[in-house]
Image (cartoon, grey):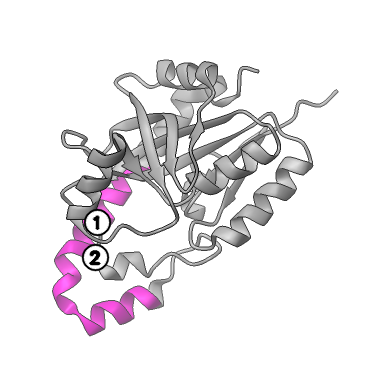
């Protein structure tokens, strides 16, 4: 009898490539929540052991650095949903130094440092992303275990420039033309864009290493 897969939810297709393999159904779509929900719902209906939100994340708390791992204990924002305790602990044990705590997600691109800090303080949240609330909604609808494991790619004091925020396509791809147009409209962004892309590159390298460290730990223990 075949083993049901784990559904891995990401924003960018590049994040998918860091974790895809046997027993994994990886789905990207951070730029289109309704489309992502439909894809996840179909995958869950076909059979799955659990749903995990995986990829880059923005820090909401002081002290978090680029490349730090955060494992979800609970999610707040558009939905309040707890993470599976056994799965959470297995993931955290596979990633030395990982922080365990609350994530915030409501689908918005948080566009000021002040709001990032305020969200962290108000919700006691360590990090924010744009997909976890969709993943949690589908996990709840199908009564599946849910987990979050993400790596910090921008710190709480770093604001993503406009050229980055417009670059996520609905299918999780990278919209280079939108980035170029934004830079043409506001060339002063260039320094922040270069810094952000370097941070993302660090995050992607970390995701590849993390996938190797997680190994079977990425599989839901239920």
Tell me if 183 is positioned left or right of 93 in this view: left
The CA distance from mark 1 to mark 2 is: 8 Å
Q: Secondary structure at mark 1?
A: helix
**Residue at image location 29% in from the left, 45% down from the top:** 153
Seen in the picture, residue 8 relative to 183 is either above or below; the reply is above
**Few, some or many residues within 10 Å of mark 2 (<14, 14–19, 20+):** many
Residue 118's mark?
Answer: none
Q: Is residue 17 magenta?
A: no
Looking at the image, residue 79 lies above or below residue 73: below
Q: Please state the extent of the stretch shown in magenta in the rendering.
A: 178-204
Residue placed under numbered mark 1 in the picture: 196
Going by the picture, which residue comes out furthest to the bottom? Answer: 185
Q: Nearer the viewer, residue 36 or 65?
A: 36
**Residue 60 visible somewhere in the drawing:** no
Label 2 sits on a secondary structure element that is loop
* Quadrant into which the N terminus falls: top right
Q: Are marks 1 and 2 in contact (CB under 8 Å)?
A: yes
Name the residue: 40% across, 48% down. Answer: 129
């Amino acid at each position: 009898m075949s083993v049901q897969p784990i559904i891995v939810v990401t924003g960018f297709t590049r994040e998918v490539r860091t974790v895809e393999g046997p027993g994994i159904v990886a789905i990207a779509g951070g730029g289109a929540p309704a489309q992502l929900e439909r894809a996840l719902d179909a995958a869950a209906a076909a059979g799955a052991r659990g749903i995990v939100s995986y990829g880059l994340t923005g820090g909401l708390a002081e002290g978090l650095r680029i490349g730090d791992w955060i494992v979800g204990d609970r999610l707040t924002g558009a939905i309040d949903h707890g993470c599976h305790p056994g799965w959470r602990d297995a993931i955290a044990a596979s990633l030395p130094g990982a922080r365990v705590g609350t994530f915030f997600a409501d689908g918005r691109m948080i566009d000021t440092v002040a709001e990032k800090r305020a969200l962290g303080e108000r919700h006691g949240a360590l990090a924010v992303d744009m997909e976890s609330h969709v993943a949690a909604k589908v996990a709840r609808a199908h009564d599946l275990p849910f987990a979050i494991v993400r790596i910090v790619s921008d710190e709480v004091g770093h604001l993503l420039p406009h050229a980055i925020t417009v670059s996520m396509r609905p299918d999780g791809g990278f919209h280079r033309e939108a980035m170029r147009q934004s830079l043409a409209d506001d060339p002063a962004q260039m320094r922040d864009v270069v810094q952000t892309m370097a941070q993302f590159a660090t995050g992607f390298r970390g995701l590849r290493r993390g996938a190797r460290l997680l190994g079977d730990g990425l599989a839901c223990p239920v």
